[in-house]
Amino acid sequence: MSIYVGNLPHEVEDKHLSEVFSDYGKVNRVYLPTDRETGLRRGFAFVEMETPEMEDAAISTLDGAEWMGRELKVNKARERENRNSGGGGGNYRRNNRY
């Protein structure tokens, strides 16, 4: 399981998050997604900690806390939604007959 951390300033680096979350236990991984086109950080991150208890302690303390001038949004990360739906046009009809 991992932790979602939102409302981050774009200048945040993984070492900053590791420092903050290490107060609650061992940090295994920090991931800061970047925009494909601009290469800029997207303002959120995912943090993985060694145990669920460590993650729960970090979430309960840091959610809503002010850090670097922003109010953090911290909660359990949800599984990634399947984006391969094959959808597209809204009014598509199978035989293109109306």
Image: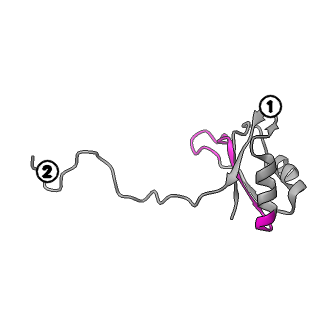
| Residue sitting farthest toward the bottom | 51
Res 28 visible: no
Query: Secondary structure under badge 2?
Result: loop
**Along the horizontal axis of the image, is 95 left or right of 19?**
left
Provide the residue designation for mark 1.
69
Labels 1, 2: front one: 1
Reading the chain from its start, which is encountered first: label 1 or label 2? 1
Q: Which label is found at residue 96?
A: 2
Q: Is residue 52 magenta?
A: yes
Cα separation, mark 1 vs mark 2, equals 54 Å
**In the figure, residue 52 lies in which quadrant?**
bottom right
In the image, the segment drawn in magenta is 34-53
Residue sitting at x 80%, y 31%: 69
Q: Indicate the position of residue 11 as horizontal and vertical percent values.
A: 76, 37
- In the displayed structure, does residue 13 sit left or right of residue 6? right
Where 85 falls versus 71 (above or below)?
Answer: below
Please provide percent x and percent y for residue 12.
Answer: 78, 41
For image coordinates 72% across by 40% down, the residue present is 8
Q: Residue furthest left?
A: 98
Q: Amino acid at mark 1?
A: Gly
Amino acid at pointer 2:
Asn
